[in-house]
Amino acid sequence: MGRGEPLEGETTAGAAEPVSPLLRRNPAYRAFLVIQALSALGDSFSYVAIPLLVLHSTGSVVQMGVVTGLTGVASIVTGVFAGVIADRFDRRRLLMISDGARCLLYAVIPVVWLFATPIWLIYVIVPVVGVFSMLFQVTYVTVVPALVAPDQIARANGHLFATFAVAGVAGPALAGFVAAAAGPAAAIGIDAVTFAVSAVGVLFVRIRTTPRVDADRAGRGAVRREFLAGARFLWAHPVLRPLTVLLSVLTFLTYGMTDLVIYLLKHDLGHRDTTVGYVLAAGTVGTFIASAVVARVRARMGFGASWITAFALAGVAVACLGWSRSVPVIAVLMTVNVLCTGVAGISSMSLRQEVTPSRLLGRVTSTFWTLHSALGPLGAAAATAAAAGFGVTAVFGVTGIAVLCVALAGTMTGIARSSPERPAGDTA
């Protein structure tokens, strides 16, 4: 890899192609970044406002959980076919439709709540919003390679990852403030406005056209074949295949990490809810660091070395969490864990965007997300049950060692290839 990735605006010795323009001089990318910020802010607003509205209306934590569960099921089911839709239709229109639909759906709630509080409406609207949220997420991944040059994908994803982190911190805080001042329904109304502005903003994003699946010529059974095309591409690729398998195991191991940290702070150490908030907020610092360094880390180390090293360090941090009794130390370890998983996550998403033909990117993305996240809820249940039975220290220790072993197992697979970033041709 030499000295690493050329700086933006810098030429490489002997390069025949023109240098890529600075990302900040790319108006389509700048507009897209703003749109993503607004959509992420809306998602994080509803993350707090919807449970608060259910709690205010029913007083039942069980109903809060039911709404959350229905949303998760809707998202997983949508993930199965979202990639087919993203590859068949115009992606800019899909972004507009997704944000526009979420705007209209969420706008219904505060309007109705002016006259009545029909809780059944939440059960209907929120899962449907989950459908459009998943469609938006899959589509946005396919859009990034059409906005920036191939050598800028990792850096662009870093910017987007940082945007999500800012929204994840600011959104819940703002939603809580608005809900306290004017009620949860008002917070959902503001949520609808953010999606409306985001939908309009898509009009100002010019996306390079890419080949699409011809629905008229696809024939009978086309959707099934199109979905399986994403799975076949993942299985045939020497890096994406082991990456999908190992990430499925890692998701199983780490999905309940936040629950374990809360259990450690509350149950074992006896701290208040405010301490839990401070520790989890401190972990977001790792997100910002990951966003800033991922492009250079990957350019200097390559994908395999950076991914394996990042998860290995994350495993060490997780193992150490169980033995920590100091809140500042726990906060630092959480920051390290989030930093490392952020670097690995941005790198793996960037790799998929680089090696997957554009016409397949939606299906590959949705298949990848569906497969590697399927074991997450089961892992969270297993981790929390084990913590209740054997203690959180033991669970952190075993989980950390397991994460380290899975990361090191990557050295024996195609993940360790020196240059898996070489784009795949459209004949793949």
Image: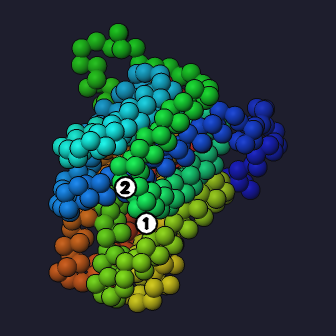
Res 263 label: none
Query: Is 416 left or right of 62, judged from the image as shown?
Result: right
Residue 97 vertical placement versus 324 (above, below): above
Residue 5 vertical placement versus 82 (above, below): below
- The residue at which mark 2 appears reads as 183
Q: Residue at x 26, y 26 (%)?
A: 224
Q: Residue at x 36, y 14 (%)?
A: 215
Quadrant of the frame with the C terminus: top left
Residue 326 vertical placement versus 413 (above, below): below
Color theme of the render: rainbow
Mark with earlier residue (1, 2): 2
Say if residue 116 shows up in the picture: yes
Residue 152 vertical placement versus 307 (above, below): above
- The residue at which mark 1 appears reads as 408
What is the crowding at mark 1: few (fewer than 14 residues within 10 Å), some, or many (at least 20)? some
Q: Residue at x 65, y 33 (%)?
A: 28
Which residue occupies the foreground of this view, 420 or 402?
Answer: 402
Report the amino acid beneath label 2.
Gly
- Quarter-wise, where is residue 102 in the image? top left
Instruction: Count all numbered tags in the image, as a single digit.
Output: 2
Q: Position of residue 79 (x, y in %)?
A: 32, 39
Q: Secondary structure at mark 1?
A: helix
What is the crowding at mark 2: few (fewer than 14 residues within 10 Å), some, or many (at least 20)? some
